[in-house]
Image: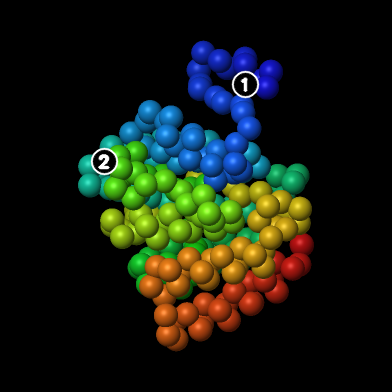
Amino acid sequence: MDILRSYQDQLQWISERDQGQVAAINEGLRVATGDVVGWLNSDDVLMPGALEQVASRFNEDASLIWLHGDCRVIDSDDLEIRRWISTYKRFQAKRYSRPRLLANNFISQMTVFWRHDVMESIGYLDESLPLAFDYDYWLRLSRLGEPAYVPQILAAFRWYSTSKSGANVSLQCREDLEIATRHGLAGTPLLIKKLENQLRKFIYSFN
C-alpha cells in the first residue's frame, strides 16, 4: 500500500473488498481509460519494452482488434522453467485458427491486449468462471477477428504448486472443457480435447 501511495500521481488504484479475482479485474477494465487494455496478475511480469511493442502494433494497424505474444514460464525465484511449454505454445500460435484455439488454449493471458471499445460489443469477463475465464474471453474475441501474433517474449508467467493455476489444474481443465463446449466444440475434436486435458493434468502434477 505504501508503494502504491508513492505513485499516487502516476496511476489510479483501488483497494477494497470485492467478489474475487474476476470481479476485481472487471472493475479495473471498467475504470480503464486507455484505447488498448489488458491485465497483469500480481505474480506475473511484463518484459522491458513489451508495452511499446503492443502500442506500436495497434498504431500501425487500425483494423487490429487484439493481439498476443510469447511468454516465459518462471518459478518463485524468477528462473525460467518448463521451456517446452513455451515452445509448444509458440508452435501453436504461429498456426492460429479459431478451431485450433477451441481445441487447445495456447494463448498466454499476460501477453493479450485488445481495443477498449470492443468491450461494448462482447462485454467483460464472465464472473461465474473462476479459473478459465480468460480462455472464454479469447474465444469471444476470436469471433470478432483473428489476433495478431507478436513473436517476441512480452511477459513471464510465474508457476508454482501453490499458485492459483498450480493448485487447481484439475478444476481448470474441467472449466476449460465446459467453455470449449459452450463455444461449439463437439464430436471428435471434443474427445481429443478431453484426452489432452487428462495428459495436461498428468504433466502439471510434476513440479
Above or below, comparing residue 169 to residue 56 in the picture: below
Residue at x-position 77% and y-position 62%: 207
**Residue 207 falls left or right of residue 54:** right
Q: Position of residue 22 (x, y in %)?
A: 55, 45
Q: Disc 1, disc 2: CB below 8 Å?
A: no
Above or below, comparing residue 203 to residue 127 in the picture: below
Earlier-in-chain disc, 1 versus 2 = 1
The amino acid on which the numbered mark 1 sits, given as a three-letter code, is Leu
**For mark 2, what is the residue?**
60
Residue at x-position 67% and y-position 71%: 201
Please rate how many residues cluster around mark 2, counting C-alpha atoms within 10 Å: few if below 14, some from 14 to 19, many from 20: few
Classify residue 140 by image quadrant. bottom left
**For mark 1, what is the residue?**
4
Q: Position of residue 156 (x, y in %)?
A: 59, 47
Please rate how many residues cluster around mark 1, counting C-alpha atoms within 10 Å: few if below 14, some from 14 to 19, many from 20: few
Mark seen at residue 161? none
